[in-house]
Image (cartoon, rainbow, N blue to C red):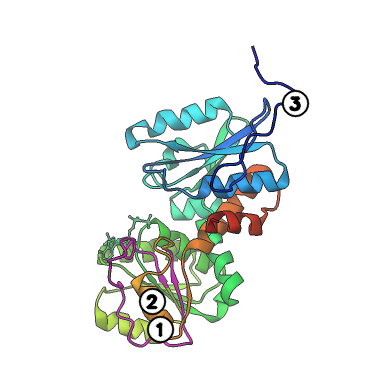
Amino acid sequence: MDATHGNAPAPPDAPDGVPAVPVTGRTRLVGIIGDPVAHSRSPVMHNAAFRALGLDFAYVPFHVRPDALEAAVRGLAALGVAGFNVTVPHKERIVPLLDGLGPAAEVVGAVNTVVVEDGRLIGHNTDGEGFSKALHETHRFKAERSRALVLGAGGAARAVCDQLAREGIPAIRICNRTDAKAAALADHLRRHHPNCDIKPLPWTPLDHRAAINWAELIVNATSVGLDPADASPLDTNGISPGHIVVDLIYEPPETDLLRRCTALRARCLNGLGMLLHQGAAAFTLWTGKAAPIDVMRRALEGP
Ligand code: ATR
């Protein structure tokens, strides 16, 4: 028997001030699958947004280990969730388990958002869009008049490069510790974006220096900096106030790269804005509504 009552008292707010999410018989479920997942800020961000718009949705974390990915995905579809986010280490491995892909997910080969439509699982990648929105919002960045140096050749780098090419950036240089991966990514992206001059660069201080002088936009899409003790992956000699430097890392909020570039008066941005805007894009895919950006930003930033 359903034990809910018509006039049940509103659930108490959590001690951190985040409003609790009421669950009804009609609540649509969304969530995030990852391993680990406990650190994720997405539940707080999305639940705040659902509350703000009065939407009967709830967002929960699912700790899914790699060997349980397929069962988890089938289970989520069978349960009729509206969709879910996908994080490390499942973003690429989930692709063959889905029924279709959006255009960015197709090129990037990784999915961060799944929408369940009539039992069909459609994978999207909103990371590139999130990156772009964050960059435009803070620095009035014009892709068609810039050149970019991207450090890294993993999933995050792929999403950023694909987005920049979609927005008409004329040239990108990809620099990765493992040269072969930078070359493979450049080849792959050139096939999808023939008008963009995309080339790999060797991972040497000399090449870094030359690329710094050539580029206006510099993006760290490596994982170097996640450990607060990590030194900058880039020799920052040559960074000037004319540069925009983005580190996709948001925890810690200021990596050694950003600290150095801020001291050199470059325009700097960490990954929090990208996290916010990739989430906002996922919110719209699931609900069909514009995301309450300021509510989500406040929830991400915490009390
Ligand atoms: P993500 O999905 O976040 O992009 P990923 O696919 O694991 O994560 O990619 C991590 C990136 O960080 C890679 O470009 C990796 O370089 P390699 O291809 O050479 O592995 C880069 N990276 C990780 N540790 C690094 C280090 N100590 N120095 C330089 N680059 C590093």
- Which label sits on residue 7? 3
Q: Looking at the figure, which quarter contains the C terminus? A: bottom right
Residue 121 to residue 45: above or below: above
Tell me the amino acid under the disc marked 2.
Arg
How far apart in space, not on screen, are marks 1 and 3 (Cα)?
57 Å
* Label 1, residues with CA under 10 Å away: few <14, some 14-19, many ≥20: few
Task: Identify the residue shown where x is 47% and y is 48%.
Answer: 111
Element type at marker 3?
loop
Relative to 86, say whether 253 is above or below. below
In the rendered view, does 163 fall on the left or right side of 50?
Answer: left
Tell me how far mark 2 sits from mark 1, CA to CA.
6 Å
Q: Residue 192: horizontal and vertical position, in percent?
A: 48, 61
Q: Is residue 55 visible?
A: yes
Q: Amino acid at mark 1?
A: Ala
Looking at the picture, which amino acid does disc 3 mark? Asn
On residue 263, which mark appears?
1
Which residue extends farthest right? 6
Residue at figure coordinates x 60%, y 77% from the top left: 140
**Of 145 and 193, the residue lying toward us:** 145
Which residue is located at x 26 percent, y 73 percent?
Answer: 203
User: How far from the left and from the top, in percent, is residue 92?
Assistant: 40, 46
Residue 21 located within the stretch drawn in magenta? no
Q: Name the residue that disc number 2 marks.
A: 259
Q: Earlier in the sequence, mark 3 or mark 2?
A: 3
Q: Secondary structure at mark 1?
A: helix
Label 2 sits on a secondary structure element that is: helix
User: How far across and how far down the image is residue 265, in percent?
Assistant: 45, 85
Q: Which residues are magenta?
A: 219-248
